[in-house]
Image (tube, rainbow, N blue to C red):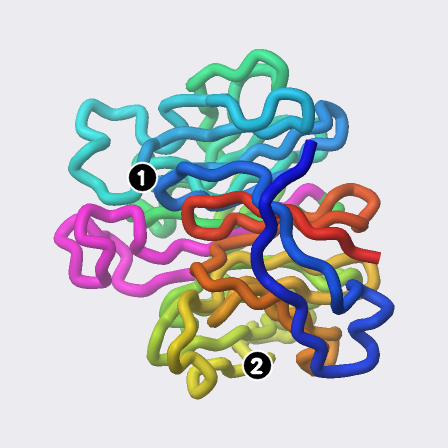
Amino acid sequence: MTYDTTGSVVRYDVALDAIIDSSETAEIIAEGFEWNEGPLWVESEQMLLFSDVPTNTIYKWTAEKGSEVYLKPSGDTGDEPNRRKEPGSNGLLLDKAGNLVLCQHGNRQVARMDAPLQQPQATFETLADKYDGKRLSSPNDAVYNKAGELFFTDPPYGLPTQGDDDPEKEIPFNGVYKVKQNGEIILLTDQISKPNGIAFFPDEQKLLIGNSDPNAADWYILDLADTVVTPKLFYSATNEREGLKGLPDGLKIDSKGIVYASGPGGIWIFDSTSKVLGKIALDDAASNVALSTDEKTLYITNSGKVLRIKLK
């Protein structure tokens, strides 16, 4: 099947040549969504899952059938999902046992789907919904380490007004959290204004966090080996936003430490030292990315579209 294409690769450093061909363009493999997020490649099923947050729906895409509804409702199982602009699931991931784990805006929790991947149902087991006795705002994105500990971000975008002054917001900051294997929830930092995308570097000692704040469009490192976890600036795009759509949002890091991060103007490609190697330039805002298991394909949620581009 042939697809329309979009975007272009912009090369800033010769090291990009080992990652992606400068002549590549992104295929539009699905479109017609409101605001899609949280792409997840599921190797066992040869499918891409992604959230359409405003419609409270998860879709699946396969090469054979294209996009189909996978799960609805996905993030708000209450009686009034329409009172929120973004009630659905956002970040999606698999736990060590291969179960689907969802960041749920409407239900204000990180949850595990209590059903097999092949027979999805809107029944969920809560993994994290409170910190210090107060409800989370709207968990956005998450990642596991190899030990099975869960790390997630909690900005306010799933609340009715999507703001820090929302009357339903119970926690006065936007935190980055760790869920221990015994279920205990630990605050890692409250010092990032709008924490969003989250991923580990290969050593699993450092987390990279995207900050979707127009006034601090930055990426931060959290070094978990530090006695006190303090955000350290990885890269600031605050002064590189003019005329470009999008903010630091979702991101992934491959097995070599190469970062693929949605940001102003498309997908930014960094090495582990924060050098910008290049970009996949896109006209519309990109929200997140997913890598195939062999790391030869990058999937991009791009406003109402889903893109696919070849890597080396």
Asked which quadrant contains residue 147, the reply is top right
Would residue 129 be found to the left or right of residue 306 on screen?
A: left
From where the camera sits, is residue 228 visible? Answer: yes
Q: Main secondary structure of the magenta part?
A: loop
Which span of residues is magenta-colored?
A: 148-175
From where the camera sits, is residue 133 visible? Answer: no
Image coordinates of residue 291 in percent, x first then y, are 70, 48
Would residue 239 be found to the left or right of residue 165 on screen?
A: right
Picture residue at 21% right of the left edge, 41% below the top? 84
Residue extending farthest to the top is: 119
Judging by the rendered image, the residue that carries numbered circle 2 is: 235
Amino acid bearing label 1: Pro
Mark 2 Cα-neighbour bin, 10 Å: few <14, some 14–19, many ≥20: some
Image coordinates of residue 55 in percent, x first then y, are 32, 33
Judging by the rendered image, the residue that carries numbered circle 1 is: 54
Picture residue at 65% right of the left edge, 47% below the top? 308
Judge whether 309 appears above or below 221 on screen: above
Amino acid bearing label 2: Tyr
Picture residue at 65% right of the left edge, 27% below the top? 62
Q: Are marks 1 and 2 in contact (CB under 8 Å)?
A: no
Q: Nearer the viewer, residue 300 or 250?
A: 300
